[in-house]
Image (tube, helix red, strand yellow):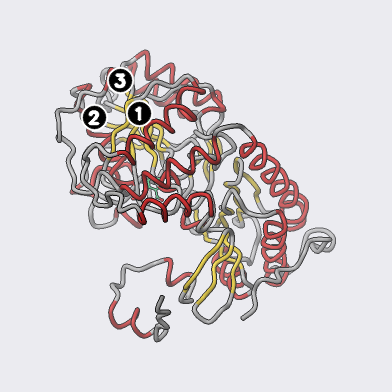
Amino acid sequence: MTTLTVDTPTVFETTESAVRSYSRAFPAVFATAKGDLLTTQDGVRYIDFLSGAGTLNYGHNPDPIKDELVAYLQNDGLVHGLDLSTSAKAAFLQALRTHILEPRDLDYKVQFTSPSGTNAVEAALKVARLSTGRTNVIAFGGGFHGVSTASLAATGSGYYRQGLEATLPQVTHIPYPHSPLGEFDSIGLLRHYLEDPSSGVDKPAAVLLETVQGEGGVWVAPVPFLRELRTLCDQYDIRLIVDDIQAGCGRTGDFFSFERAGIVPDLVTLSKSIGGYGLPMAVVLIKPEYDIWRPGQHNGTFRGNQLAFVAAAAAIRHYWSDDSFLKQIRTKAELVTDLLERRVGRTYGAGIRGLGLMQAVDLSTVPGVEAGDVSRRCFEQGLIIETCGRQDEVLKILPPLTISQVHLSAGLNTLIEALAALSPAPLIGDTRGDLPTNEVHAA
Ligand code: PLP
């Protein structure tokens, strides 16, 4: 194989659009990756707390999946993306049914959309609107659902909406139960809108939400809220759509993020890690009674990413045929929360919150420290970690679910050391402990 050494950063600056973003936050040219590590073309290694923005729950190039992909390619398996019936698609549907849906007593039809998350959201909103004959949608402040048209309408962020507001279809945003502004009785407001025919808010086709808001700053919806929302949607014949594009596929410590509440959404969007290997794929899970699509009504040339089917089926069979993987995720999540509470929360007064391996360090309560500076410092020290939240005030810890305990601890140590270096003064004690240093960051 030819190894291409790129003239850095010239070709990106001269040729790639200004819209590029992650490459600005993490200015290196990456060449290879394995498990929880990325390596640049110069041989410098980084621990990954970003996971391809949540697409790599099983890490980079996991062998059990890679072997199946290689065998499929060697065998000249179909690769193009039309929604033909193929053996690869059948294997994925079978694995999903056997290992994910049936054990959870879930009965969903599976719609394949174009492979980005935003297209799954577009499809879910369309089918909700078509099946109710209504237009309005309730979404939440801080929610992120993509940046195409209907999904952008539901996304809260002013940064993405700016200049396009007038082009977006009808959505009513209400505050999420937890946000930087404090707790809010979202159910009370929604009930008020629904009960008052003169509220000025049209009866919605759907309520769309993330049960853990990712881009909005890792805010976790309380279980009673989720249950009451389900009841309210049933009462008023409103489709409940859970966008599990970031929080699904094991990220929060269950396969689906809504399992903790014991609710069953009418529609579920999945993308990112459902493709198993970072390969683009998106689906909408639809309760059979709402699968009212006419053939090809939500069309697209790339609704059948065969390699993603192969990888997704392999991932499900390998990681989800028993609960050992879940137990590992939960053990690692405990390590993260315990360490962050002790060494970051109590020491610097930062807000620590999250679910499973989707955790946040909120620096809005730490004077004089910007999350962006911490992220940059971490990068210099060999850790890739991104910011999120309304003002980029939050560091989001999103490692591969397969990360080794050693690299998890070393990455957390890099984060703690970055905070120590940038904070004017800790509230209490020394931040350092018995954590391993990040020894992977060497050329
Ligand atoms: N929904 C959620 C919850 C997301 O986190 C994202 C992406 O970050 C999307 C939708 C959009 O997915 P995509 O970027 O693949 O269009």
Q: Is residue 81 left or right of residue 185?
A: left
Give the label on residue 127, or none. 2
Mark 2 → mark 1, Cα distance in angstroms: 9 Å
Which of label 3 and label 1 is nearer to you? 3
User: x, y (%) of residue 416?
Assistant: 71, 63
For the residue with label 3, is its CB less than 8 Å from the closest atom of ligand 1? no
Q: Earlier in the sequence, mark 3 or mark 1?
A: 1
In contact (CB < 8 Å): disc 3 and disc 1: no
For the N terminus, the quadrant is bottom left
Q: Residue at x 29, y 56 (%)?
A: 162
Q: How many marks?
A: 3
Give the label on residue 288, or none. 3
In contact (CB < 8 Å): disc 2 and disc 1: yes
Mark 3 → mark 1, Cα distance in angstroms: 10 Å
Q: Is residue 204 above or below residue 161?
A: above
Q: Residue at x 30, y 41 (%)?
A: 120
Which residue is more in the foreground, 425 or 437? 437
Q: Report which quarter residue 136 is drawn in.
A: top left
Q: Report which quarter residue 220 is drawn in.
A: top right
Q: Residue at x 36, y 85 (%)?
A: 10
Q: Is residue 349 left or right of residue 31?
A: right
Give the label on residue 383, or none. none
**Disc 2 residue type (three-letter):** Val
- For disc 1, the marked residue is 267
User: x, y (%) of residue 443?
Assistant: 61, 81
**Disc 3 residue type (three-letter):** Pro
In contact (CB < 8 Å): disc 3 and disc 2: no
